[in-house]
Amino acid sequence: MGATGTLLIYVVVGLTVAAWTWMARRHSGPWAHGVATLAALVFWPVFLPFAFGRASPSGAGERGSRFDQRIREGELRLERALASLEGVAENLLAPQRAHVAKLSDGLRAIARRAEDMEQLLSTPEFDRRRAEALLSSTDDDAYAERLRRRLDNVVRLETMHDDAVRDLERALLQVEEIGSKMVLLRFAEDPDHEALRLLEELSLTVEGATEGLALTTP
Amino acid sequence: MTTETQVPGMFDLVLSDQARLDRLMLDDSRVITVIEQLLALSVLGLVLTGVAVGVAAEAIDISSYHPLAALSRGTAVLWMPLTAVAAFLGALSICLPSFYFYTQLAGIDASFRLVTAQALRAQATTSVLLLAALPVFLALALANVAVDVASGSGVLWVGLLLPFVLGLFGISSVYRSFSRLVLRLPKTHARRGKFVRRLVLAWGAVYTFVAPVAMFRIGQALSELL
């Protein structure tokens, strides 16, 4: 196949990807719409994965958790709140972007630990009903004693799990609240120090929760 | 002010906030905008580099027996920018499946989209650095043409090698990014040793092999047309 044939195939595939881009970006402005479509026609190999590929994996670490979406939303909310203060307190707040990422990592660590506990609680060894049924049906004292110790462990794990979920819920609510407060800071008299204070407050909550679980933020 | 739907200036992100760029790449609602901006930045840097090298090639006399004599064919200022864009972005496109394959082999379950974005990050970082280096290159070329203090072929070699040398900074930005993302991305299998370093070296090796060949072949074809 010569250069003409190769070019023809390139253009045909390019037109397909450009058509997808035209449809997918129809809500953009006319200029952005046109430029994106033209770019897709010329540089279609770069756009192809977006037309047919799978989405990016979740940012929750090595395994996703049911809290991923809320943590991601909270992170974006704080980032947007910090961005809304640009021009008001940007010098003081610029380093805080890294801090927000660290906080999110802390929240993800708690979420992962809570998921680990849930998985453990779903195993037969930590099945409370099964242990209670066995305890009520046995006449062997030594076996009953072992079952009681196992039940204690199950209760302890359930308490730790509930604490982790409660701390996580509290931290996520605080993220939402602080995100809203920070947006309003743009109109405050001393926005930089107030924003730092809010972030420190959030840090303390997350650190408290991670320390409670004997975790350290990465 | 950066609003909810806007992506911050890509130039600033590439220069000073690559960690934030990581997070934008993982955000499905904004990754396509990120890709477009990285692509625009890459094209801008490559076009201007091509124009600068083309202008230098037009101005500097090269003997027809010199290895760089091909640069004096046609109108270099026209075909050189096209060659730079087609060669570097074409090589990147050709290498994308290999990049994805190496990433999976390294135990990082990155999507093809993320791999594409990372490859463009390397090119965009290189382009930003090229924009910074171009005035120095043009000063060198001017020094040769005006007062003959620099070797003509030496200046052209600098221009041709500049994207490859600065590309090392681009690939190191990908290394730093994967080092950060490795904690967030799912893993495909157990990983040992410095797997991120090996992964990025594999990316760099395949690209370094393909890009010069693409540049030579595309340059050869376009210099006969333009």
Image: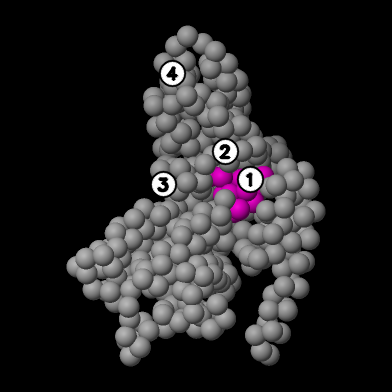
In percent of width and height, residue A28 lies at 73, 44
Q: Distance between the residues labelled 2 and 4?
A: 30 Å
Residues in magenta, as a range: B23-36
**Magenta stretch holds residue B30:** yes
Q: Which amino acid does label 1 sit on?
A: Arg
| Earlier-in-chain disc, 3 versus 1 | 3
Q: Main secondary structure of the magenta part?
A: helix
Disc 4 residue crowd, few under 14, some 14–19, many 20+, Cα 10 Å: some
Subunit under mark 1: B
For the residues tagged 3 and 1, is the chain the same? yes
Please tell me the numbered disc located at residue A64: none
**Going 43% across and 18% down the picture, which residue do you hit?**
A192
Label 3 near label 4: C-beta < 8 Å? no
Which residue was labeled with disc 2? A111
Locate residue B153 relative to residue B1 in the image: left or right. Answer: left
Subunit under mark 2: A
Q: Which amino acid does label 2 sit on?
A: Ala
Which residue was labeled with disc 4? A192
